[in-house]
Image (spheres, rainbow, N blue to C red):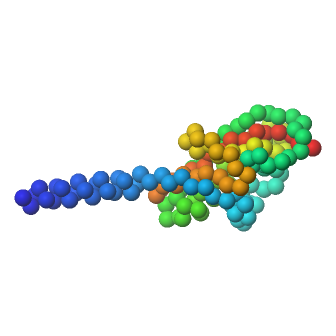
Amino acid sequence: MKRTMTTIIALLITVASSQVLARNDIQDYSIEEALFQEQAKEQVGNEIRFYFGKQKHGKVLKSWGEFATNKKTNAFLKSDQEACTWAFLSALKALRDRALREGGNAVIDIKSNYKGRTTVSDSTFQCGAGNIIAGVALKGTVVKLP
């Protein structure tokens, strides 16, 4: 009887802990707050202009097409917001690097594309955060503006 009870308790702990580790909370976070962070200036710089959602921008002189990025970061012992901000800035950096490689000076129509679910917003981005990893996926069009 004692052995059966020990086995049941061990099984319950295993199931409960796997549920905790499997956390993947998808939340919206403020683009403005993320870009206001000191690390944003260091990570993203200011060579490329970013336009989110349907934000207005100048006339497109040339377009190189839409590009996607999917960045993950270590979320262990970090708040979801802290981890998601870092992943967001990493995703913007990847879009920036692509724009520079292509010869563009802006990325327009940036939208979240977390797990293939596209959401368009001028003010927020989506991030999936778990106990160990947080991730941000973005898509944007690399262009040359006046």
- The x, y position of residue 38, in whole percent, is 72, 66
Is there any visible trace of residue 101 in the rendered image? no
- The x, y position of residue 51, in whole percent, is 78, 49
Q: Is residue 53 left or right of residue 13?
A: right
The residue shown at (73%, 35%) is 66
Question: Among all residues in the image, which is located at the extreme right?
Answer: 146
Position of the N terminus by quadrant? bottom left
Position of the C terminus by quadrant? top right
Between 124 and 104, the one lying in front of the other is: 124
Q: Relative to 69, is 2 above or below?
A: below
The residue shown at (73%, 60%) is 32
- The x, y position of residue 110, in whole percent, is 72, 45
Q: Relative to 83, is 95 above or below?
A: above
Q: Relative to 80, is 127 above or below?
A: above
Please give the count of numbered marks on the rendered protein.
0
The residue shown at (54%, 52%) is 26
Between 45 and 27, the one lying in front of the other is: 27
Between 37 and 121, the one lying in front of the other is: 121
Question: Among all residues in the image, which is located at the extreme left?
Answer: 1
